[in-house]
Each structure stands twice: as structure tokens, then as C-alpha cells.
């Protein structure tokens, strides 16, 4: 058995626990995440023209991403529930069938908002898939990653281009 002292999310018995952040200072924290949905150009055209039976794909995906960010602590077992002070998502559409999704999440607290930003992008992408799957089951959700984060003990992080 591995020594529990080596892992922050294990208690003395070696079982999962949520890290205690009680003594950490509150700081302003922001996180930006990215994701991409690939689809046929015809599907993208239907999204732009609001020609799908389920309605406004990007409007619903925006709302789903916001709701998901707020519920991240309930979805990811070791995440702390956060009081988020700002959540925004943006979508950029490319004619060849690509939707770029970016999220920005902001809070003042003891722990970061990276998981909330990633969850927002992920659920927004899944919502696009759900709303379009009747016409395009070949869609792909790709490249979900943290772009940048500020605040907290680990400081400022910016993803390097690969």
C-alpha cells in the first residue's frame, strides 16, 4: 500500500478526502478554458440559421456551460464548491464545421476556478453535440484544456502553444 502522506487527497487510512483549505487566504482567481467541436459544414449552417428542431444551440449551450460551472463541486468528487462571481462563454464558428468554445470563470476564494472553467467548456460542447446529434452523429469534441489561470499559491499560469 502507498503511504497516504504522499497524497493530498488521501486521509491517514489511505481513503479519499477533500483537502482542507480553511487556513488558506482568499484571493481573486480567474481561469480560462478552451474546447472545440468538429462537425459537418451543413450542421454548422443549421446552427447558424437556427434550423435544428431543438432550437437555439449556442444559447442553450451557453446556459448549460454556466450552470455546469456552478455545479462543478457536485460533479467532481474532490472539488470544493465555489462561490463564483463571474462566468462567461464565447463561441467562434468556422465555415468548415468548427465551433471554438472559450470560458472564463472568476471567484474570490481559497481555491481556484480551473475545474469550473473546464467543466463549463465541456458541458457546453456536450450540449452542442446533444442538440445536433439527430443530424450529425459524427461530431467530435476535442482539445479541451486550461488556457490560463491567475491567483492562488501557484500563481499565474499561461498554457504554452504546442
Image: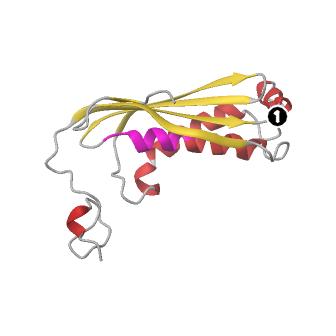
| Residue 52 in the figure: left or right of residue 104 | right
| Residue 89 in the figure: left or right of residue 59 | left
- Image quarter of the N terminus: bottom left
Residue 15, percent from left and from top: 30, 72
The residue drawn where x is 48% and y is 41% is 118
* SS assignment for the magenta stretch, majority: helix
In the depicted view, which residue is nearer to us: 102 or 64?
102
From which residue to which does the magenta span run?
112-121
The residue drawn where x is 74% and y is 43% is 131
Residue 88, percent from left and from top: 49, 29
In the depicted view, which residue is nearer to us: 38 or 102?
38
The residue drawn where x is 31% and y is 32% is 29
Q: Pointer 1: residues within 10 angstroms few (<14), some, or many (20+)?
A: some
Q: Secondary structure at mark 1?
A: loop
Q: Which residue is mark 1?
A: 40
The residue drawn where x is 26% and y is 61% is 7
Amino acid at each position: 500500500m502507498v503511504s497516504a502522506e504522499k497524497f493530498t487527497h488521501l486521509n491517514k487510512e489511505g481513503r479519499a478526502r477533500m483537502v482542507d483549505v480553511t487556513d488558506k487566504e482568499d484571493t481573486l482567481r480567474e481561469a480560462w478554458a478552451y474546447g472545440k467541436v468538429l462537425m459537418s459544414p451543413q450542421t454548422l449552417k443549421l446552427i447558424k440559421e437556427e434550423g435544428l428542431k431543438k432550437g437555439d444551440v449556442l444559447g442553450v449551450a451557453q446556459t448549460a456551460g454556466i450552470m455546469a460551472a456552478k455545479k462543478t463541486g457536485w460533479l467532481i468528487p474532490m472539488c470544493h464548491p465555489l462561490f463564483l462571481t463571474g462566468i462567461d462563454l464565447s463561441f467562434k464558428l468556422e465555415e468548415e464545421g468548427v465551433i471554438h468554445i472559450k470560458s472564463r470563470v472568476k471567484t474570490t476564494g481559497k481555491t481556484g476556478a480551473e475545474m469550473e472553467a473546464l467543466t463549463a467548456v465541456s458541458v457546453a460542447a456536450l450540449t452542442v453535440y446533444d442538440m445536433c446529434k439527430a443530424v450529425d452523429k459524427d461530431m467530435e469534441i476535442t482539445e479541451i484544456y486550461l488556457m490560463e489561470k491567475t491567483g492562488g499559491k501557484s500563481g499565474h499560469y499561461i498554457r504554452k502553444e504546442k
